[in-house]
Image: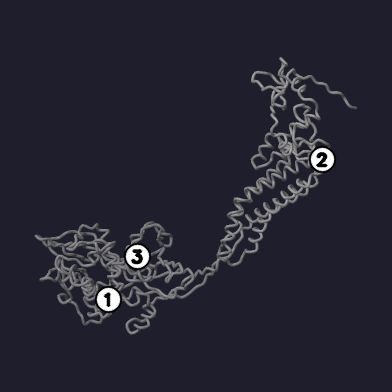
Amino acid sequence: MQGTCTFSLSPLTAQFVHAIPDETEDRKLVEGWPSQPRTLGRSTIERIYRGFLDLLGILVSVPFIVLAGIALDRNGKDIEESDWKRIQTSMNVAVTAFPILFAAVIGRFTRVIATWRLERGCSLGILEQLFWSSTFVSAIMTQLFMRSFNLLGLGLIILWVLSPLGGQSSLYILRTARDTTTSVSNIRFFNTSLGASFDSGDIASMPQINALYMSSLLAPQSIKESPMDLWGNVKLPIMSRMDGGTTSHGWKDIKKDSHVVYSSLLGIPFENIQRGSNSSFHMESSYYDIDCFDVSLQPEPVSMTNTTRLDIKIDSKSWSPPVIQKTPDHVFLGNNGSLSCSGQECTTPFTLGLDHYVTDIMHQTLDIFPNVTDNKQTYFDEPPVLLFQSRWWRPSTRQTSVAYCHINQIYVESKVRCVDTQTSIPQCAVHAMRDSLIPHPARDLTNFIFPLTLQGFATYLSESTGTIHPADNSLTERYLNNSANPLLASTGDLPLFLLPKETLSERLTQVVNTYYTSSLLPEGMTGNFSATLANRKSFYDPDYAAVPTTATETAWKPYTYQVNPAWLTIFIVSSTTMLFAAVWTAIIAHRTLIPDVLGYVSTMTRDTGDPSFPGGGTTLDGLDRSRLLKNLPVRLGDSKAGDASTGYLSFTGAGVAQRASRGRYYE
């Protein structure tokens, strides 16, 4: 049963309506407006346009599926640099492109679904949920504002979550990794407990020893502070200068960024480290640690003596417990010579001496003493004192820098780690130390208690850098004064008495250890360890000079591709969702007959009965209607402006309704 609907117009509206002749004539005022009824079939151009959009939505989804397939295909394979760069470029592009394309495809998908549901009939709430859930945030806000907490809303939120997740996952679907293989190998390192040959008088290899010593003193500061010397030998830190505590097993770890003071500028040579792998091994060794407790300027040098003035049984070959005596007060056994100068030449620039010496055994070996198992026990009730003195002559005075020090031989076990950097030699460093657990002599027993050894060492060391003239200084003294740049010292005697005790102790430790180490096996220090041992069998027993140990070798396999299962799953789900959405968009859009009118302002001109809007045109899509009516003035205003009681807000032509006012009541 049909009813009749009547309405009254305000005077202003009536005038505007009368100004429009009739509906047929009104349609003619809009160019391109449908003048005759037509079916819901679309034109060829519209079908081509929609088909292009459908195809484009499918095509933009395919590259992401292909990228996921490439990741699966490469998994576990060796990488190729060019291929990996292309994949990285693709992943970097995908992380930006995916959210944009996903939003375009899914946004069109929800619009098409909403139009399809509108054709078949559904609740207004479902249409609003579908249409306004165009981003992740809007999907949440739509459910909150409409209070539509249902499965559709949950599904839309989950759908839009895939947009950021899919984009970010593309960066992490594939990475490069490499596995390691662990093996054990046999290596050898130099035995630092070997005795030097300073007691033999004339040493044939003295030029090589002095060359090694001077090269080490003049090395760049970066080499002096590095864990390896110029020739790739690993240096021993001074354990007493290391920061931090010890572990339950006595280890002191070397922190990565800590300042490490090394006992010598020369390291310990080793051999048989495997190339192409990282190695770690334990090394037993020893070094001298000097601690100066009194540094001062004295008016006269301390008296020195030599073996000819002491009661020493040079011909004795007894291996019975040794007899050790102390030198007379204020007299030290050391250099042959004094600090005096004659003419333009000086006997020696500085002197070294010790106040204890063995009287009845001349052989340089500490094996005749009882062993201990740590670095705390001592042999002497009163520790031996090492003397160092250097000239400080001025025009009016002839004074001497004098330092009294304790010297100990520290036996340590070191953890050494070598990293293969594909260079000529592995990069090795000691990363932890502890007191040696192997029996060894007490710490205050050093090779310098043997008179000829001390006398020869002190003499050769003081003469190692050549003859010194008055008002000049040796390279050794220059290093003690300025270890970073020894050659920067000015000509003349150096005020070594001004050095802090700790600084002089560290530098004197390095000087003594460097010169002593260089004398043990000079040819083997420069990278010829194996060949040197083979050529010097008559002097050193190779089985004793080279200490065997086992090293753990960690070799790296080639880099391979490795997928991240979790991120790849997210990426595949997101990409296939976008592809399925694009396919379903094409299918549903093809099966939908009604025009696309949702979301367009021009849709508000439909079915209003307002004479200011052209009638008909019900088959037009919202975008087509907007294009045809784009110049039509409109307003959401008061269509009952003449009514004194209440107004009525409606969407009309701009000339029909008046502007709304703040204080007026509206229906």
Q: Position of residue 313 (x, y in %)?
A: 20, 79
Type of residue at label 3?
Ile
Which residue ends up furthest to the bottom in the rendered image?
Answer: 538
Type of residue at label 1?
Pro
Q: Position of residue 472 (x, y in %)?
A: 17, 66
Residue at 70% in and 51% down: 56
Which of the 4 quarters of the picture holds residue 30? top right
- For marks 1 and 2, give the CA distance: 113 Å
Name the residue nearer the viewer: 285 or 626. Answer: 626
- For marks 3 and 1, give the CA distance: 43 Å
Q: Which numbered marker is on residue 120?
A: 2
Q: Mark 3, mark 1: which one is toward the viewer?
A: 3
Asked whether, in this view, residue 298 is left or right of residue 533, the answer is left
Residue 238 is at least partly visible in this image: no
Q: Earlier in the sequence, mark 1 or mark 2?
A: 2
Quick check: 178 above or below 106? below
- Residue picked out by circle 3: 223
Residue 212 is at least partly visible in this image: yes
Q: Position of residue 84 (x, y in %)?
A: 57, 62
Question: Which class describes the residues within 10 Å of circle 1: few (<14), some (14-19), or many (20+)?
Answer: few
Quick check: 134 above or below 405? above
Residue at 77% in and 46% down: 589
Which residue ends up furthest to the left in the rendered image?
Answer: 396
Quick check: 442 above or below 4? below
Name the residue nearer the viewer: 381 or 31. Answer: 31
- Residue picked out by circle 1: 321
Secondary structure beneath label 2: helix
Type of residue at label 2?
Arg
Which residue ends up furthest to the right in the rendered image?
Answer: 1
Name the residue nearer the viewer: 424 or 27. Answer: 27
Q: Earlier in the sequence, mark 3 or mark 2?
A: 2
